[in-house]
Image (cartoon, rainbow, N blue to C red):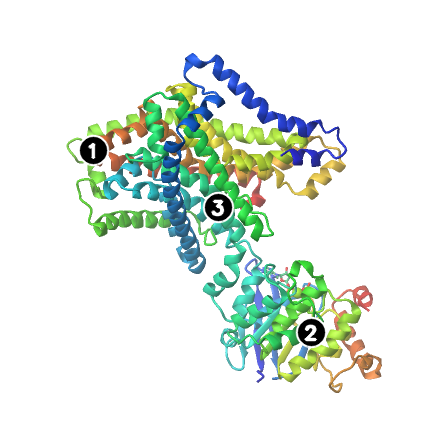
Amino acid sequence: MSVPVTCTAASKTYPGGLTAVSPVNISLAPGATTALVGPSGCGKSTLLRMIAGLEEPSTGTITIDGLPPSEISRRGDLSIAFQDPSLLPWRSVRKNIELALDLARRPKVTQDIDELIQLVGLDGFADTKPAELSGGMRQRAAIARALATKPALLLLDEPFGAVDELTRQQLAEDLPAIWEAGDTTTLLVTHSVSEAVMLSDRILVLSPRPATIAADIKIDLPRPRRSEFARLPEFSAHVDEVFAFLSQGVPGSRAKAAQ
Amino acid sequence: MSTGASIATPGGTGWQPRVAAMGPVLLVIGWELAARLLTDAHVLAAPSAILLYLYENAGLMSRALGVTLTNAAVGFVLGNTAAIALAALVAIWPASERTVRGFALLIFCLPLVATGPILRVIFGPGPWPQIVLAALAVYYTTFVPLLVGLRALPSNWLDLVSSYGRGRLAALVHVRARAAIPYLVAGLQISAPAAFLGAMVGEFTGAERGMGVLTIRAMRGMNVEMTWALALVATAVSVGWYVAIGAVAKRFLEDEPPVILAAPNSETSGGGWRRTVVQLVFVSLMVLIAWWGFLKVLGLNPFFAKGPLDVIQAVTTASDAATNRDTLLTALAETSVYLVPGYIAGLTVGAMLAMLVVMVPMIAGTALPVAIALRSVPIITTAPLIVLLLGRGAAGTIVLVAVMVFFPTFVACLHGLKQAPGRITDVFDVFAAGPLQKLVRIRIPAMLPALFAAAKINVPASVLAVTVVEWLATGNGLGSVMALSASLSDYDMLWSAVALVAILSVLGYGAVGLLERRVLGIYAPEQLK
Ligand SMILES: Nc1ncnc2c1ncn2[C@@H]1O[C@H](COP(=O)(O)OP(=O)(O)OP(=O)(O)O)[C@@H](O)[C@H]1O
Ligand SMILES: [Mg+2]
């Protein structure tokens, strides 16, 4: 099952008076993978949290499958992986994953959990506590937790932030299979433009704060994607296009440095 | 302790640990000598005499200890269960917080010395008054850290729960409860000696068996060995209980229990003066209704169960209202003369000593654990000793109040002083600032919140101390009015005294809170969130 997401003139102004997101209109097709890229502090996490129903939009509305986000949450059909892994320190990797299943009121199938742990490359660490994992391993555990409930809408906030380049590529190649198989609508925030191109059907480039949509780029590379795609000329063209939009309104040096 | 000292001086000459081990030995020898020199004074019992007494009266003492310990343990379980339930209620239903906290504070401010006799007439001669007093003595010191603990977690953990569409109950069950356990342990540790103390105070009020009964007997009979033996046993049991909880927790928890005494800032706080006043009035009304309802529901005999109206009449329109008012005010004045200096002295000495200790790094390392452990000493049970040592006059009472206030203050301040952010002290090190400058610029502002937290919680604690001494020994002030009206069955007076003390304690607590906001607003605004 997959769900469409619609943001209609949704904006966010925090109580302090800081506007993180200007009114935006976004509609995400069911089952599509969309990447959000934008400069640090522009309001990406805020947008993600609004879609997850964790922040009320200050204006406008957000619906998922025609319903408010809280309804989708209540069905256990939504998962969010936060920017920091937010694992419960007293629970092992497996128990953290089971927590999501418990909260979403889904059955705990040991075999599924084992497979998931293996998929994110944590086999052998199922019974390890987060404190004994590296930063990247924690992030992978958090991704596994988000995937465990086979959500209809998956929100990932910089899921590969603390992962080394090789593992990152590996994950970028392996993980999409999971959410594509489940026909999941996915929205992911990333700072890596090439990762955004590699993973998504569509890239939304956000302007500096308050976020507006600076560009909406369709990525029509075939699926499944493989790491060799990075050498295709279409791929580089997309990367360049995203960078061009990113550098608008941002001091030029920064965009270059990012390259 | 000796290992701590040896770690502190790697490659040292090794004399420090030996001194540390010698300390207690010298203390006992000195004590023995002093006691032998002062035999005629009837104040100090020599360690050998105490041991001999314990040996000869092992049966009596162990029976009494068994009774008191049982009552304390039942009260401990009940009081802590209530604390956990209250904290859970606040976590599930945050709107109830102000009311629940107001009630909890007020009940904590009830003077145990007067609640005891009232419970005695309600429950009769059995163990229940002791048990209820033990429960009353413990629940608040667990409730407060638990409130902190239930909130001391990253907001993402709670967001995770909401992202699966689950509410506060699920957050409590799956996340908050476990996150609060170290705080629960801290609360349970402090409540161990409090439970023992509550049970003993309960036994003062006419129980048939127990350590409290023996204490009264020892005091009446001027039996110095017995008084000392009882105080020592009470202390040893409380410390043991405290240490045992810590040891059990250590086996199951990776994280150390936190040292917290402060009530958290209310999540629903703010809204200015008007709202505070409205809430105050609301909570007061609720209390009056609860008081009245409690008596009605239990169907208690109006002869001894006085409601709010009876109390108001007793000091306003009753025929003896003027005498009643006089008695209460005179007693209040007498009590304040002991209470205020003792309270201030305890706070001052506690804070000063903490400052001195952090300026001497060599002892700073071991001082905190020792001081934390000393919190487990049930000061009140040593009241008879202080009366023996310093007499029934003002000095004894003031010292007892000061000692009661001193320990929590010292621990809180020491802890606060150690919290001074490391980075900032490093910056000061770079500029070669002396320890004094560091103290004034960084450490004292960091200590203030802890000092105020201690000052607040010590308001009811010092009232308890002063009323106990007045009741047991000095024979004046509110404590003695309560004892007297209990024995004369003057229940109007007893309930009025309870109400007066509770109201004044709550007001005192509130006044310290206001002062805290003022002072922190000036010296450490960042602590006021
Ligand atoms: N709870 C909050 N209260 C007030 N301001 C906030 C809050 N959360 C975020 N902000 C502000 O909103 C702005 C956008 O924050 P957000 O976390 O959405 O940025 P981001 O695009 O995710 O940045 P990054 O890439 O660094 O993670 C920032 O200026 C931040 O300071
Ligand atoms: Mg972010």
Distance between mark 2 and mark 3 Cα atoms: 42 Å
| Horizontal arrangement in the rendering, residue A14 relative to residue A130 (left or right) | left
Q: What is the number of the mark on residue B187? A: 3
Give the residue drawn at x 42%, y 12%. B40
Using the rendered image, report if marks 2 and 1 lie on a common chain: no
Nearer mark to the viewer, of 2 and 1? 2
Q: Secondary structure at mark 2?
A: helix
Q: Amino acid at mark 1?
A: Asp
Binning the other alpha carbons within 10 Å of mark 1 as few (below 14), some (14 to 19) or many (20 upward) gives some
Residue pointed to by mark 1: B490
Task: Report if the CB atoms under discs 2 and 3 are less than 8 Å apart.
Answer: no
Give the residue drawn at x 56%, y 77%. A8
Nearer mark to the viewer, of 2 and 3? 2
Q: Secondary structure at mark 1?
A: loop
Residue pointed to by mark 2: A118
What is the total number of numbered labels drawn onto the structure image? 3
Quarter of the figure with residue B490: top left
Give the percent coordinates (x, y) of residue A32. Answer: 65, 83
Give the percent coordinates (x, y) of residue B308. Answer: 24, 43
Foreground residue, A114 or B423? A114
Q: Amino acid at mark 3?
A: Gly
